Image (spheres, rainbow, N blue to C red):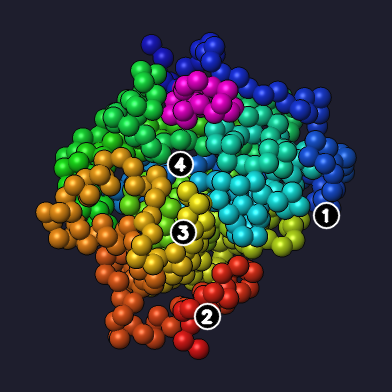
Amino acid sequence: MSTLPAYAIQRKKPVYYKIMTDKLTNKKTLVILLNVVLFTKCGDTATEDKTNDYDPLNVLFITADDMNYNSIGCYGSDVENISPNLDRLAGQGMMFTNAYVNIAVCQPVRQSMMTGRYPHNNGALGFDPIDMDVPTLQEQLNRVGYLNGIMGKERHYQPTEKYCWDYYVTERDLASGLGIGRCPDLYYEFALEFFNRAASQNRPFFLSANAHDPHRPFAGSEQEMRAWGEDLPVFRREILPEEVTVPGFLPDLPEIRLEIAEYYTSVYRMDEVVGAVLQALDDSGLSDNTIVMFISDHGMPLPFAKSNVYLNSNKTPWIVRWPGKIEEGSVDTTHFISTIDFMPTILHALRLPLVPDMDGRSFLPLLEGKSQNNRDMVFTQFHEIFARIDYSMRSIQEERYGYIVNFWSDGEHEIRGDAASGRTFRAMREAAPYDEQVAERLDMYVYRVPEELYNYRSDPDGLVNLIDDPAHTEEKERLKNLLYQQMSRTGDPLADEFEERFLVN
């Protein structure tokens, strides 16, 4: 019997998948241009320069979908052995404990990562295409001959022609499995095919491998059955309610505890997908020359996490492995990094020129064990996205304090979205008439207040709003002014409104 994990066993491809063909099949060799980027169309690559002996670096970028930063073992989860593959990856590279996404919803944050710009500067505030004149990371890589690949979530990168995917496995092309984004076996199979294609063409690669777990519907849930009927993704381990701890920002009700268990069942399967992709990379023989990054695109799809600007909305696990460059088992507990920094960091690591007008900046020095100034805070935001209702929010977070402004909060409008579906929100509504604490918490989530201030060092779940506490007036005003400076500097369209409504001076 084979000793390989299930996802490493080769098998005939199922009839329900389709892989788009490589637009650059005839390209045989590549040498990176170090000092110039040719401004060509997406399908054109740079001319070869055989005088350059630089060995191009590959990039494997793996994402989880809707996972809290502390849901995996290396970031503090108390569910036993919930993430063996990610824990192993962290031991082989560097963990950042102050890493954040700049907006806690899927398409805007992914497009921010691949443009290095905040949503209001790339044209994609919500589920929108970016502006055609905004450069993307994939365009820069395409111009110097990289093989660009994506597995899952390709619909969150629009318009398609701006992202130059040579190889992609789409959600629409697949009826189940990888199309649902939850089958480790298929991720292994497709990833290995991609890596082998890059090797056979002698081209460096960028692969975005996107797990769909633990996004709703959770594994084994009623919501999952309603969504997909009998064609359900398999899960190999079921997490039970007694194994989990309900997050502190939610009440510990039976139905909520059950949904948290379903969520963690999905987290475990996500970790298997990560392990499958990493196994494929090892089996391809390309691991030693590949930088691997892992993040979650934002927090769990539950109240006070996804689609908000709380610590549990934006904080993400961020793991980087770079053989021979990053000290194994290292942890950065000092510097703040953001997904807005992803594109400039990748360009810097690949020795490619930066593009103009990016909002982020490279944190390559941190990967090299150095320090960087002005990395002691992060700015996050949310925009008008759902149901024609403006949920504009902005936040600034430091190591200790976090300030939030909710432009939309007027005591009448109610928040909507994916986080208000499923067992948890329903359980809070049902318990509210009989439990005053649950009622207060529900009211805070649904209607919010215009301003919030939290001591995240002592209150990471954001339970005690300090905005009206006289003892914190100085901190409040300091953070508000810093937020206004950031909004003004980046051309935030709400900067003038913030100044008028919320600044004392």
| Res. 408 visible in picture | yes
For the residues labelled 4 and 1, the Cα–Cα distance comes to 34 Å
**Magenta residue span:** 169-189
* Image: 328 above or below 85: below
Q: Mark 3 is on which residue type?
A: Tyr
Nearer to me, 225 or 385: 385
Disc 3 vs disc 4: Cβ atoms closer than 8 Å?
no
For the residues labelled 3 and 1, the Cα–Cα distance comes to 43 Å
Where residue 46 sits in the image (x, y, percent)?
A: 84, 41
Q: Which residue is mark 2?
A: 500
User: Quick one: label 3, few (<14), some, or many (20+) residues within 10 Å?
Assistant: many
Q: Mark 2 is on which residue type?
A: Glu
Q: Earlier in the sequence, mark 2 or mark 1?
A: 1
**Looking at the rendered structure, which numbered label has been put on residue 35?**
1
**Residue name at image x 43 percent, y 60 percent:** 309
**Residue name at image x 56 percent, y 61 percent:** 366
